[in-house]
Image (tube, grey):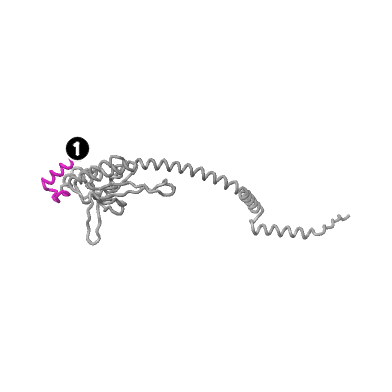
Amino acid sequence: LRARVPEPEPGELDRVRGRLQQLAALFRRYGDDEAEVLAYRDRALAEIARLESADEDAARLQEEARHYLAEATELAGRLREARERAAPRLAAAVTALLHDLALAGARFEVRLEDVPLHEGGTERVSFAVATAPGEPARPVGKVASGGELARIALAVHLSAAAGDVPTMVFDEVDAGVGGRAARAVGRCLAQLATSGTQVLVVTHLPQVAAFADAHFVVSEFGGRRRASAVRRVRENERVEELSRMLAGLPESDRAREHARELLEMTGQAARR
């Protein structure tokens, strides 16, 4: 007996062909296989859910924004109070140090300028200086020479306890000073070096160099192609090097005597 083949349902072939076309279209658009198509579906459903809850999220985010704005405003107010208390103290301390650093007529100011709330609070802090009596104070960068700027930076860091700064470099910090003022500069640099900050100073003044814990000499040599060399001065050479800086005569007995006096005055001679 032969098995009876069931008659196909009307339109079944067209339905199967249509289904295959749909699958082919899905694969072309959303992935190479069923797994990729289903993964795309899951992502689409998640995005739909996110969009449907957008209004709720917006309300929640707005509430969070109000909360954080209020907190930031409160903190900015406390920061402003601290700055208003500290500004005159810092200005007075820096001004006093500038007088010791051969800027006797200088006046240092700390200015607080109102600005919209930002990551630094509700004011902008700036420094201004008048380098002579009767002059108006203007922004430091616009009125100070290289040597004055270095001395102002030295005074600010000394006043603000610069132990958090690992290394500071001063060039021309002693420009335009000599004698007693140069010793004041050297003393302030030595004080800064004891606060936890490594201090590097480029100087031509023996009054400043005498305060150094380590003394280096930079020299140039060569013909058309110049080169530089750095050599550390040994402790037993300090007197000779300071004599050279004082008078250009390292063999001079008077210069050497003066060099020894500088080292004794700065306390370096006790280490020798």
From which residue to which does the magenta span run? Answer: 244-272
10 left or right of 45 in image: right
Amino acid on which the number 1 mark rests in the picture: Ala
Where residue 158 sits, quadrant-wise, is top left
Number of marks drawn: 1
How far from the left and from the top, in percent, is residue 1? 89, 54
Q: Which residue is mark 1?
A: 270
Q: Is residue 20 above or below residue 193?
A: below
- Residue at horizontal 13 percent and vertical 45 percent from the top: 256
Where residue 6 sits, quadrant-wise, is bottom right
- Residue at horizontal 80 percent and vertical 59 percent from the top: 11
- Residue at horizontal 24 percent and vertical 59 percent from the top: 226
Report the front residue among 137 and 145: 137
Q: Is residue 48 magenta?
A: no
Residue most extreme to the top: 270
Can residue 189 be seen? no
Residue most extreme to the right: 1
For label 1, the SS is helix
Can residue 92 be seen? yes
Residue most extreme to the bottom: 224
Report the front residue among 136 and 150: 136
How far from the left and from the top, in percent, is residue 45? 64, 50
Residue most extreme to the left: 253
